[in-house]
Amino acid sequence: MIPPSRAPDAPAAGPAAAERGVLAFWREVERCRCAPLGGKARAGAVAGLEGWLERGGARAALLGPSGRGKSMLLGAWALELARAGRYEIAFVPVSRRFGTALEPTALNLLYARVTPFLRSPRRAGERPHGVEEMRRDLASMLEEGRPPEERPLMVILDGIDEAVAWSADAAQRFLRDLGPGVRAVLSARSIEALGGLREGTEVVSLPPIAVDEVAEAIGRRLGQLPASVKDEVARVSGGEPLLVEALVEAFAQDPAAVASALASAPAGAPGVLDLCAGGAIRPVLPWLAGALGPIETEELLAISTVRGGAWNELSGPLVDAGEPGLALRHPAWAEAIEARLAPHERAAVDRRFADHGKRAFASGTVSDYVCRNWRAHLERVGASLAERIELASRAWLDVWRTRPDGSSGFIADVDATAACAASLLVDAAAGGDVLAALAARVRCLLITSAVRAILGFEETRRALAALAAQDDEEEEGAQGGEGSAGPHIEMPRVGEDILDAGRPIADASERAGALIRLAHELPDAERAVVLGWALEAASEEHAGGGALAAVAWALDGQARLMTAREAAARLGRERTEESRSARVSLAALLPEAEALDLGREAFAEVPADARSDELPRLSEAAARWSPAAVRGLWAWSEALPPSERHMVLARLASGLPAEEREAGASEALGLALSLLAGDALPPDACWSICALAPHAPAGAASALVQACAAAAGLHLPVVKAVAARLCDLGRVEDALALVDTLPQPSDRIEARSALLAHLPAAVREAAWAQLSGDLRASDGARLLFERNAAAWTRALGADAVLDLSRGIGANWPALVAIAVASSDDAPAIARDLVERALEQPSDEDEALFALIPLAASMTEPHARRVCQRLLNELGWKPRPDLLDDWTKDDLGHLAPLFARVAGPQGVVAVAREIVDVCRWLP
């Protein structure tokens, strides 16, 4: 019988295979409960578990050798707890025999069992995708726990040391910190198998059966036997229930043969193995011991070196010939069989399984066993990354597509491949493998992000459909009709595959942007190739015009002109604020006449209620046009009212030729000052003066000071801009006096911070001493330091600025700015920052993005470690929404690190992975 808290109904296939394995486990529990062995030993262990419950411990472990009956005891105890209403039960047997030993399978089962009793961090219908997300969700749910008024939850992971390609250390992620109302029990052969969970876990040992109970069990099963035979059974079995049961079954099949061999049989599992292993079954035992789950007879014989013989039925005390295929009945037999193999024989068995998977994959005839276990076999033989990379391929995805739980299985294989690549990436001894490791790590990241986006879209679609159906029902009810139960919206269930679901979200623009950033790190020849890929992505029908514009800026010659024209045409159809800004920027790449037409059209499109916001931005972009085009737009602006024209001219002035700039600035300044109303300037005019100040002629100094007095609401930014210009004009005392007019001390500190880089060397040192003292006593010192660190470094040198940084505890971006501004000091600063950063816990890795500008100054080992930590951060970066996935864009920002780690070839390899993966998994 299965506890009431078993998993919800599973789909008809895939996860149902695991559920069928769990059903078989509970049938075995029920069978053993009907004919129990070792009542005294079991009672003592149960008493130990009950004592642990009374003491209120969070975790307990039932320990004992293989075959002692831990699973049967825990199963029976869990049934009693559930029937008595003392605990909700989430029981998961981790078993190769029952096909639940793989981590994705076991965690899917556990997630399904705890979800009815714990609050999920996800929305209705949404589920975790992949092992890592499952671990995180389980950790969150189990740590939050159960409300005090509800029945507590008991989580039981039976046979954790039988796990395939994972261990208790992986379970530590979600069993380490259990919340209120949650307890956990694990079973294993030894305390060492608990790994990091040993601390804080109470141990309960299960002893062997007493000699008198062995004799009683034999009599109960076989009737009266000579006392000498019972004594021999007790001796050979050592009181281990599994061995007793195997000998009893062997006696039942051939009592004469077993009785004659019993006296000379050695004690323990090896002796029982010899007694129970018939001639036909003996050759296949090493291969069954090497299997990681149930396997079909034909496939097992194809893998093994066994030839010939009659294979009527491979079953009996050792082998279970169940519905999923052959499996050893217990891991104790695998231990005994493998103990007899020499190391080279054991390695040969493992290699045959790995090679069988490789042949099956190459031939396109992948069985369910190979699909689910090939990765674990590759890990057991220490396969190279070149062998494992097939697990992150389109062909392997196609294999998993045929399984109803394909998404979780495929992601688990990809995550394991990513872990292998990550270890090589940070290993300085990898040498030439770093290129392959980087490419593989990026490929795995792209695959998992794409699969999660696909699944997230499908879950969102179903959730929205459910909400729509609910709204329809409510509307029908409001109209007075009886209505119906409404259409049932089937949500994704654990293990259900929706990899084939469509995702009408184009990532072409993001892809193009990433490729452009990568291209910036490349020599001309490789750069042209990667930009060609970017152009291909941006040219896709569903890509936005902004992507094509970005590519145009990166291209040269005729290709740039043609792409700019196509981008302008696309952008012209979009008619948005972003489109207008992109078109004006793009006009800088076009001939003068085309630029003017494009710019005037964008300016004219701006709605009346957005002109104060958009005109200054558009004008800043237009200032980068050719001087002739800037003059043309300057002339065109005469048609604008003064309240708008000053905003345009103030920004355009910087684009005029040097000999015309001061005159243009004077004209714009006059327009801005003409808007003076009473004693105050409107905010738009104040911002225009800030933009104009760097270009104002010496004769306009008094007008600028006048503007400061009138800039009531924006006094600080105007004073900062005007004071900087006064310093540039040599009027340092006037500038400092102007700063002193600021009423707030914090404003004066900020203004002096911005002014420092403009001061002449003669007064700079004294100003720095005063400013340093003020900043050390200021609450906002870090922000001001970050804003001005680069300018101060260029003016004063790195030593003085670094000294202040230590006094105020400057943040990483500020220190990076110092290093970028002082190339001589960059290596030392980079080394210090990276060493500090790598000591931080991994959940703070997002801060490492600040170090990317220092990539060229990092040592290669440091660069590898930072690169891997950031790639890992991208893999689990929280998304603002299920449909948002900016992985490719983030990869583009990591381009300097890729170049430092693997050179231009590494950058090209990353670009190629972005292109290739998107072709088969968009």
Image (cartoon, rainbow, N blue to C red):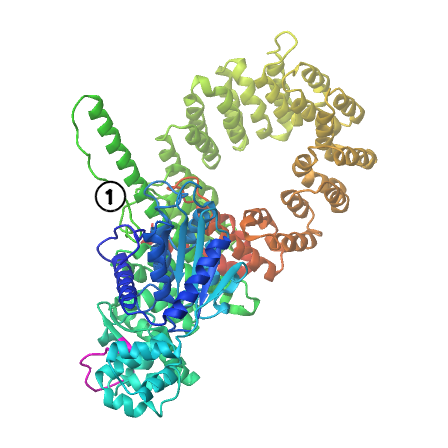
Question: Where is residue 507 shown, x and y percent of the image?
Answer: 37, 44
Residue identified by numbered label 1: 490
Of residues 62 and 408, the one drawn nearer to the viewer in this rendering: 62
**The stretch drawn in magenta includes residue 306:** yes
Answer whether residue 348 is visible to the viewer in this image. no
Q: Which residues are magenta?
A: 302-319
Q: Is residue 229 left or right of residue 563?
A: left
Q: Is residue 216 left or right of residue 894?
A: left
Q: Residues within 10 Å of mark 1 (few under 14, many from 20)?
A: few
> Element at badge 1?
loop
In the image, is residue 603 above or below residue 330? Answer: above
In the picture, residue 350 is in which quadrant?
bottom left
What residue lies at 24% left-to-right and 27% top-to-bottom?
A: 474
Say what amino acid the circle numbered 1 marks: Glu
Question: Where is residue 725 shown, x and y percent of the image?
Answer: 71, 27
Q: How many marks?
A: 1
Question: Where is residue 64 shown, x and y percent of the image?
Answer: 44, 71
In the image, is residue 522 above or below residue 71? Answer: above
Judged by its main secondary structure, the magenta piece is loop
Of residues 512 and 461, the one drawn nearer to the viewer in this rendering: 461
What residue lies at 76% left-to-right and 34% top-to-bottom?
A: 777
Q: Is residue 418 left or right of residue 481?
A: right
In the picture, residue 349 is in which quadrant?
bottom left
